[in-house]
Image (cartoon, grey):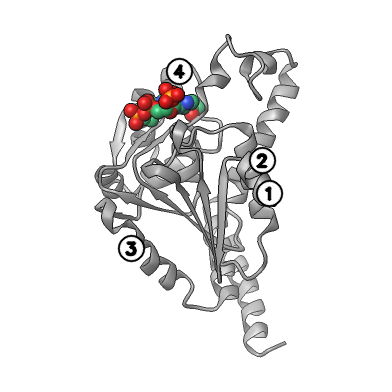
Amino acid sequence: MTPEELAHADLDLTVDGAVATITLNRPEARNAQRPRLWAGIARVLEELGPEIRVVVLRGAGGTFSAGLDLGLLDPAKPDEEGNFITVLGLDDQAIIDQIDVYQRPFVLLGDPRFITIAVVEGHAIGAGFQLALACDLRIAAEDARFCMKEPALGLVPDLLGTKPLVEAVGYARALEICASARIVSGTEAGEIGLAQVVVPAAELDGVLAATVDALTAHPHGAVTATKRLLQEAPARTIDEQRLAERTAQVARFRALAGG
Ligand code: ACO
């Protein structure tokens, strides 16, 4: 994407060796998300080269993301790109198809080609929480504030957040967090398995660098194949998973032998 296209998508992108950093770059609106941002993240991820092993997602200005741009829920702003009033003019299937497009970057963040890390400081609300959940790992500041605000606004989380949340913290805790729409601190996120690393905000960059080093230290093909196996494990029986492991190992043997 060109710098102009990235700016239009409220994004900044830096690539340093095997690491791509996507920054939500609309700090004046606390990195509130619009459809253009989702389309931009999808395009950035699709255009990354095979050398990229880690994708870091973070927010500019000390906030991860305040979630959906509330202008999109405002009936007084029907001209806003993606405003729900406009969406309501569509039939049910067309709305479902539209949300499918919006969900695309959240799906792509799970691509086995790379490991995705959300660096969460400040707020991760609604779509912001879901964006963090779409990443493989979350590194959070102790005073970060996660909130699944959608039910409080009469909505459901529809950007893929429900599945990784249940997988991370279990059904009961996920329900409690969503139904209450309460704030989960970074410290609590670490305790309940929502965040894998939790540190004071000033230490985020250091711990991120160490994590990236660890995640890129070993053969890319082995890491990619292992990520795929782990992702697919919950949906498989033991025998199906055993077969998947054996099959993946054949490919690893051949790669090690240079064939
Ligand atoms: N959409 C659009 N603009 C936003 C959003 C948002 N979600 N969040 C913040 N902004 C804007 C504010 O309107 C304000 O703009 P202004 O300077 O033109 O008045 C600016 O960002 C700064 O916001 P403040 O509220 O002043 O910032 P503060 O740091 O005090 O608070 C916080 C941050 C807690 C994130 C607060 O802005 C907030 O609660 N935002 C709304 C969160 C929300 O309900 N998101 C939707 C969740 S549901 C979903 O994502 C589907």
User: Between marks 2 and 4, how big is the CA–CA gap?
Assistant: 24 Å
Q: Residue at x 57, y 74 (%)?
A: 220
Mark 3 crowd level (few <14, some 14–19, many ≥20, 10 Å Cα)? some
Location of residue 259 with respect to 66 vertically, above or below: below
User: Between marks 1 and 3, how big is the CA–CA gap?
Assistant: 28 Å
Mark 2 crowd level (few <14, some 14–19, many ≥20, 10 Å Cα)? some
Which residue matches tag 3? 207
Q: Give, as a three-letter code, the residue at label 2.
A: Ala
Q: Which mark is residue 39?
A: 2
Q: Give, as a three-letter code, the residue at label 4.
A: Leu
Q: Is residue 103 visible?
A: no
User: Between marks 3 and 2, how big is the CA–CA gap?
Assistant: 29 Å
Which residue matches tag 1? 43
Q: Label 3's element?
A: helix
Q: Residue at x 57, y 56 (%)?
A: 232
Q: Which mark is residue 153?
A: 4
Q: Is mark 4 within 8 Å of ligand 1?
A: yes
